[in-house]
Image (cartoon, rainbow, N blue to C red):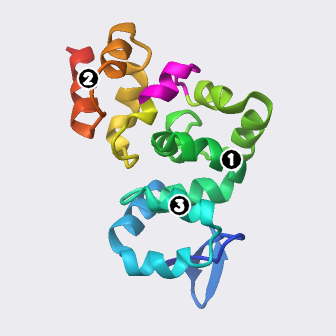
Amino acid sequence: MPWRVTAWPETRFERLYGDEWIPAEPSEAALASAAQTLHARDWATYLDFTPADVRAFLAQFTFARMPALFVVARCPTLLADLAETPALTPFVAAHANLVAGGTPHWAELTAVHERQGIFGVLQWLGLPGSRQTLSILRHVAAPDLPRKLLEPLRTTLWEPEAIWRLSHGPVLTDARLSAACHALAA
C-alpha cells in the first residue's frame, strides 16, 4: 500500500486504504523503502516548504532522511540537539526496537528530553549519558548509520577501551565503527 507525508509542520504519515488516506505510523521497513525510492528531486520539492533549520538538518542525511524527518516531526524539541549530533538520529528513529519493545514512545522521549536534556535521551536510548558519547557520535563521518550497526555500537560505547579508541582516531566511518564493534566481540 502506498504512503505519503503531508506538508510541514503537520508532517503526518498517511497510508492509502481504498480511496482514503489514513494517518498511520510507518514501520522501519516502510521508512527504509522510502529512502530507496525517493530521489533528490522529490526531496527538493518537499524541503522547499520546511524551515531552514529543518532543511539543513535533513540535508545531512542520504539514506536515513525519511527516518530523520520522522524524528523531527514527532519530537521537534530534539532538533537543535540532533543538529549538533546527527549520528544520534538513527538511534532515536529506531528507539521502538532498541528500547521500547517494538512500540514507539514519542511522548515519553519528548518528556525525557524536556526534563533531562540530551544526556537523559542518551540514557533512555541505552547509551552512556556522557559528553564523551556525544563527542564520539559527532565524529561520525555520515549520520546515516546502518540499522544493523546501532545495537553493536551501543554496546561498544560502554567499553572503556573502545571509547578510548573511538575518541582518539580519525573521522569515524561505518567501516571503522564496524571494526571497533567486531574487535570488542572478538
Residue 140 can be seen, yes or no: yes
Q: Which amino acid, mark 3? A: Ala
Magenta-highlighted residues: 126-136
Q: Please report the residue visible at 40 percent of the width from the left and 31 percent of the height from the top.
A: 151
Q: Which residue is mark 1?
A: 106
| Mark 3 surroundings within 10 Å by alpha-carbon count, few (fewer than 14), some (14 through 19), many (20 or more) | few
| Mark 2 surroundings within 10 Å by alpha-carbon count, few (fewer than 14), some (14 through 19), many (20 or more) | many
Determine which of the numbered discs, if any, sits on residue 56 in the image: 3
For residue 84, what is the image quadrant?
top right
Q: Is residue 91 magenta?
A: no
Q: Please report the residue visible at 68 percent of the width from the left and 47 percent of the height from the top.
A: 106
Q: Quadrant of the C terminus?
A: top left
Q: Which residue is mark 2?
A: 180
Q: Which amino acid, mark 2? A: Ala
Q: Pick whichever of labels 2 and 1 is earlier in the sequence.
A: 1
Q: Pick whichever of labels 3 and 2 is earlier in the sequence.
A: 3
Q: Cα distance, mark 3 to mark 1?
A: 23 Å
